[in-house]
Amino acid sequence: MSAALTLGKPEHLDKILPLITAFHAEEGIETTHEDRQAGIAPLLDGIPHGAAYLIGPPRAPIGYIVVCFGWSVEFGGLDAIIDELYIRPGVRGRGIASEALIALPRALSQYGLRALHLEVDKTNTAAIKLYRRAGFQPRDNYMFMSRSL
C-alpha cells in the first residue's frame, strides 16, 4: 500500500469528507457535516491558507493530511501546522503514516516552507513514537495553547 500524497481538489470532496467524519468520530470531535464541509471545501478550492492531501490512491484514499500555513519570525519564514492526520484503521500499522509524514515536508519545502509543527495528545504514546520517527521533536518549555473565537 502506498502513502502517495495527492493535493486535494474540489473533485475530491466526496472522498475526503467521509475520512474527516471518521477521524472526528474517533477523536470525539463534535462537528456537523456542514462545519466539516465548510472547513475543508476552501482548502480544496485552493485558498492560500492551507492544503489538504489525500493519502493513497485519489479514487479510494486511505487517509488524509491537512496543513495550515503561517509565518514565523523565529523559523525564518513560512511555516505550517499539521491540523489533521488520519489513516483508516484497517490499514494502520503498515508504515503509511510514517511515509506520509516524511513525504509531506519534502513536498512543501520546495515552496519555501521552513518549519512544520503538530499537536499531539501527551498520553498518545503510539502517535508520539510515530512523530518522533518522522523527525518531530517536542520543544522544551513550550506548550501549544488555543482560544476559540
Image (cartoon, rainbow, N blue to C red):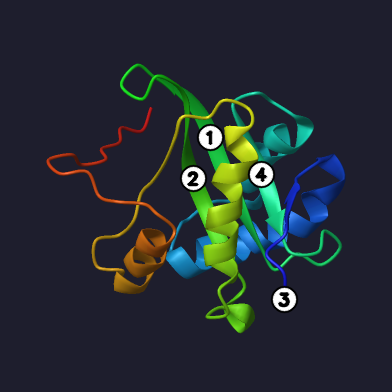
In the structure shown, which secondary structural element does the residue marked by tag 3 occupy?
loop
At 29% across and 71% down in the image, what residue appears?
A: 125
Q: Residue 83 carries which label?
A: 2
Q: Nearer the viewer, residue 100 or 144?
A: 100
Where is 24 relative to 44, above or below? below
Where is 94 relative to 73, above or below? below
Q: In which quarter of the image is residue 134?
A: bottom left
Q: Residue 68 carries which label?
A: 1
Sort mark 2 into few (<14), some (14-19) or many (20+) by Cα contacts within 10 Å.
some
Amino acid marked by disc 1:
Cys
In the structure shown, which secondary structural element does the residue marked by tag 2 occupy?
strand
Q: How far apart are marks 4 and 2 (CA)?
A: 10 Å
89 to the left or right of 135: right
Q: Distance between the residues labelled 4 and 3?
A: 20 Å
Sort mark 3 into few (<14), some (14-19) or many (20+) by Cα contacts within 10 Å.
few
Amino acid marked by disc 3:
Met
48 to the left or right of 57: left
Residue 44 in view: yes
N-terminal of the two: label 2 or label 3?
3
Q: Quadrant of residue 123?
A: bottom left
Q: Comparing marks 2 and 3, which lies closer to the viewer?
A: 3
At 65% across and 23% down in the image, what residue appears?
A: 48
Q: Position of residue 149 (x, y in %)?
A: 38, 27
Q: Comparing marks 4 and 3, which lies closer to the viewer?
A: 3
Where is 120 relative to 39, above or below? below
The residue that label 4 is drawn on is: 52
The residue that label 3 is drawn on is: 1
Q: Do the residues labelled 2 and 1 touch (CB within 8 Å)?
A: yes
